[in-house]
């Protein structure tokens, strides 16, 4: 196991199954540019080998499948089928929900019980302006069907001033009523927002402001969370809970256990670093050769982690596995 001076190690892997996305969210990409698959994305077999190696060498225990939009990829099904042999206890998936209803049988048969669905508003006009793709009703119906299928669902919302701040309370009321945990993700200085500080600052809504807003309607108290959790969790007295991923306000770098693998085989140890470490070359090697080489890459990736503060990076989330 590779551990750094702060006692951090990689325990949770986020795998970007594809860089392609059927949305072009304002916080992810500039100018509504739709993201396509990278030219040299790994095959499902290569991805499975990468995950196996990372399990064995880094000791990753939890896998989150993300992207891009993972449900768009034709590698989803063969990847999930193969995943069964790797015996991961904890497999989850992050999706924008657009294709969710049709993919539920595959997800369920792969044993996926936990979904994070990104949804930034319940207002169809605001939805179109933020996501620049997809259809709100389709997402809501997909979420509902996933719930009926017994899946545990968290909703990810990025609150932004001048965009969907007025949706914080309707979204929370909806999630409390439906039994979904709402996760507010503070806007992160990634991609174009890393290059345009003034746009970022104008839109950013922090943890304190969110708590004040929510406090006008709900009583809540901070709940326990695992030590390497990215989210601060709050229980609402009348029932339900919400979380805030407060990268900026309350950075969690000191306990971060995340490792990211891009769809093209690059490892990233920190969201605030655009340094990637290519493991694609190791995938065809026998384990006795691949393991020591991968250990070298992993200690470099672990060395990329920030000590204490999130600074963002010019890379966009779709290539990192958001
Ligand atoms: N397509 C999937 C989805 O929409 O959930 C998975 C990929 S998406 C990049 C994963 C998450 O990253 C989403 O919940 C999105 O809100 C978040 N995200 C992307 N860019 C962000 C940014 N600049 N600040 C905060 N969250 C961001």
Image: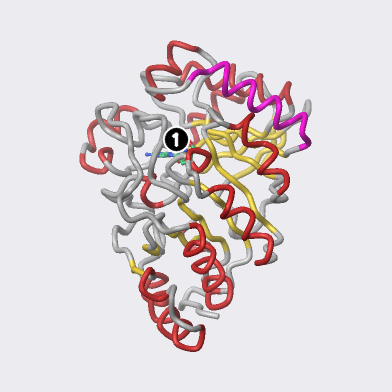
Q: What residue did someone put label 1 on?
A: 206
At x 69%, y 31%, the residue is 180
Q: Is residue 306 visible?
A: no
At x 46%, y 77%, the residue is 4
Residue 108 locus on image (x, y percent)? 72, 43
Q: Is residue 300 above or below residue 318?
A: below
Examine the image and state in which quarter residue 284 appears: bottom left
- From the viewer's perspective, is 138 left or right of 23? right
Examine the image and state in which quarter residue 1 appears: bottom right
Residue neighbourhood size for the residue with mark 1, other residues' Cα within 10 Å, grouped as few (<14), some (14–19), many (≥20): many
Visual colour scheme = secondary structure
Q: Which residues are magenta?
A: 135-150
Numbered label tally: 1
- From the viewer's perspective, is 315 left or right of 7? left
Residue 247 locus on image (x, y percent)? 45, 47
Examine the image and state in which quarter residue 36 appears: top left
């Amino acid at each position: 196991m590779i551990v750094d001076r702060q006692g951090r190690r990689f325990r949770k892997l986020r795998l970007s199954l594809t860089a392609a996305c059927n949305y072009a969210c304002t916080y992810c990409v500039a100018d509504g540019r739709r993201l396509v698959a990278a030219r040299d994305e790994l095959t499902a077999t290569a991805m499975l080998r990468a995950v196996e190696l990372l399990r064995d060498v880094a000791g990753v225990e939890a896998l989150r499948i993300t992207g891009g939009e993972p449900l768009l990829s034709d590698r989803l099904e063969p990847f999930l089928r193969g995943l069964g042999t790797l015996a991961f206890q904890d497999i989850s998936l992050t999706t924008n929900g657009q294709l969710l209803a049709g993919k539920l049988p595959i997800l369920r048969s792969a044993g996926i019980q936990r979904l994070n669905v990104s949804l930034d508003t319940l207002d169809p006009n605001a939805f179109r302006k933020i996501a620049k793709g997809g259809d709100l009703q389709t997402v809501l119906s997909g979420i509902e069907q996933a719930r009926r299928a017994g899946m545990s669902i968290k909703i990810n919302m990025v609150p932004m001033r001048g965009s969907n701040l007025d949706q914080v309370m309707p979204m929370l009321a909806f999630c409390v009523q439906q039994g979904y945990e709402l996760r507010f993700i503070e806007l992160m200085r990634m991609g174009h927002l890393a290059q345009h500080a003034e746009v970022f600052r104008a839109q950013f809504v922090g943890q304190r402001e969110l708590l004040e807003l929510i406090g006008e309607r709900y009583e809540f108290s901070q709940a326990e969370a695992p030590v390497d959790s990215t989210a601060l969790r709050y229980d609402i007295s009348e029932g339900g809970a919400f979380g805030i991923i407060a990268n900026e306000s309350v950075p969690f770098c000191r306990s971060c256990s995340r490792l990211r693998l891009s769809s093209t085989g690059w490892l990233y140890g920190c969201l605030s670093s655009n340094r990637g470490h290519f493991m694609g070359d190791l995938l065809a090697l026998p384990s006795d050769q691949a393991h020591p080489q991968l250990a070298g890459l992993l200690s470099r990736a672990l060395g990329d982690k920030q000590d204490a503060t999130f600074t963002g990076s010019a890379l966009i989330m779709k290539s990192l596995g958001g």
